[in-house]
């Protein structure tokens, strides 16, 4: 079983949808705190509509998004280690939402969505790892250059 992550940075909606379909994704779990985007087609309602037309379901999981104060602090200081500690502290308090996501991943091939192209610098990777730990899944990142699978048992 895979839990996928996917980014839309630098990609068209059609490219994004094609990559999801090629991996058999049937559900996109949007883990942006605020599901809005300056990029056309990637805000909540238009994205959900486009996904539905492509045969992919959509759900927004606000609780698994990175809180604005954590994002703002990172923008100011660029300290990834501090960002990671702050986000993981937040994630530890989101167990009900993680359990909801676990249930979805067990039933449906799911991709966690956020903007950032570099999955090594995005909170969605920590969310995916938390789910993988509970499901025995492999974390696989859908990127513009192909699929990247993480080694089994990789810690957050």
Image (spheres, rainbow, N blue to C red):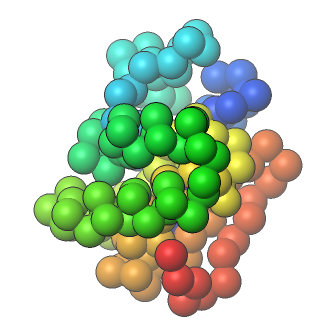
The count of marks equals: 0
Q: Position of residue 105 (x, y in %)?
A: 36, 63
Q: Quadrant of residue 109?
A: bottom left
x 39%, y 72%: residue: 130
Question: Taking 30 as reference, is 108 above or below it?
Answer: below
Q: Nearer the viewer, residue 147 or 67?
A: 67
Residue 4 can be seen, yes or no: no
For the point 51% across and 18% down, which residue is it?
37
In front: 49, or 36?
Answer: 36
Quadrant in which residue 41 is drawn = top right
Identify the residue at image location x=50%, y=55%.
Answer: 83
The residue most toward the bottom is 153
Residue extending farthest to the right is 145
Q: Going by the image, does 57 lie left or right of 73?
A: left
Give the percent coordinates (x, y) of residue 117. Answer: 70, 42
Where does residue 58 sit, x and y in percent of width and height? Answer: 36, 36
- Reply above or below: 137 against 49: below
Residue 135 image point, x, y percent? 36, 80
- Taking the image as shown, residue 23 lies to the left or right of residue 111, namely right
Q: Is residue 88 above or below residue 154?
A: above
56 on left or right of 134: right
């Amino acid at each position: 079983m895979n839990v996928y992550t996917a980014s839309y940075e630098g990609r068209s909606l059609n490219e994004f949808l094609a990559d999801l379909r090629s991996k058999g994704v049937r559900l996109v779990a949007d883990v942006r705190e605020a599901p809005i985007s300056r990029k056309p087609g990637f805000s909540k309602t238009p994205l959900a509509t486009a996904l539905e037309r492509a045969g992919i379901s959509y759900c927004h999981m606000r609780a698994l998004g990175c809180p604005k104060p954590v994002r703002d602090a990172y923008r100011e200081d660029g300290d990834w280690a501090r960002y990671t500690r702050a986000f993981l502290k937040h994630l530890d308090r989101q167990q009900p939402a993680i359990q909801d996501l676990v249930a979805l991943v067990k039933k449906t091939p799911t991709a966690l969505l956020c903007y950032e192209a570099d999955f090594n610098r995005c909170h969605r990777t920590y969310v995916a790892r938390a789910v993988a730990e509970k499901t025995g899944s492999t974390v696989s990142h859908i990127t513009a250059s192909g699929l990247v699978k993480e080694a089994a048992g990789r810690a957050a």
